[in-house]
Image (cartoon, rainbow, N blue to C red):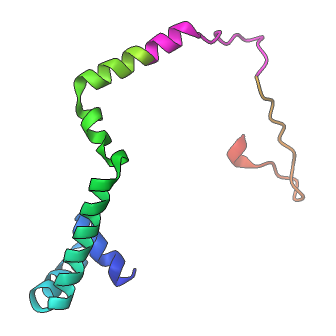
């Protein structure tokens, strides 16, 4: 992990205890490292202020938004219901597993 990645993890509160202690010590004694962290925090703040996609938490936390989203989703489902599967129904896609050169079929698709 690079020092930049360590600072980002520190800033986000995701660094392990050893890294937190090491960087905390650097912050106490190194003006340069304090400036690096302050600059990273400024960059993070500029990104948060300029990226509207990051404002989604306001919508998700709003109960009325979630109620409207649920209502719209349910209306779409009721408008275009999918037929229920029956035993004699054919799948939309048929997957044929063929053995590889060693004679084995891919186990992750079975």
Residue 38 visible at all:
yes
Q: Position of residue 89 (x, y in %)?
A: 76, 13
Could you tell me if residue 15 is visible in this image?
no
What residue appears at the point 59 percent right and 10 percent down from the top-left corner?
80
Q: Which corner quadrant holds the C terminus?
A: top right
Image position of 102 (left or right of 63)? right
| Residue range of the region highlighted in magenta in the rendering | 73-91
Q: Quadrant of residue 62?
A: top left
Q: Judge whether residue 99 is colored magenta.
A: no
Q: Is residue 77 magenta?
A: yes
Left/right of residue 97 with respect to residue 71 in the rendered view: right
Q: Main secondary structure of the magenta part?
A: loop
Residue 91, compared with residue 24, is above or below; it is above
How many discs appear?
0
- Seen in the picture, residue 77 relative to 11 is either above or below; the reply is above
Which residue is nearer to you in this view: 27 or 39? 39
Q: Residue 35's spot in the image, x, y percent?
A: 19, 83
Name the residue located 37 percent from the left edge and 22 percent from the top edge: 69
* Position in image of residue 24 (x %, y %): 15, 81
């Amino acid at each position: 992990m690079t020092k930049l990645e360590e600072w980002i993890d520190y800033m986000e509160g995701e660094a392990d205890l050893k890294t937190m202690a090491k960087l905390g010590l650097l912050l106490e004694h190194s003006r340069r490292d304090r400036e690096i962290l302050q600059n990273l925090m400024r960059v993070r703040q500029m990104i948060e202020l300029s990226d509207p996609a990051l404002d989604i938490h306001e919508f998700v936390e709003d109960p009325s938004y979630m109620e409207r989203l649920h209502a719209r989703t349910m209306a779409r489902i009721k408008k275009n219901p999918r037929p229920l599967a029956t035993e004699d129904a054919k799948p939309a896609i048929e997957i044929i597993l063929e053995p590889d050169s060693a004679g084995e079929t891919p186990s992750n698709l079975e």
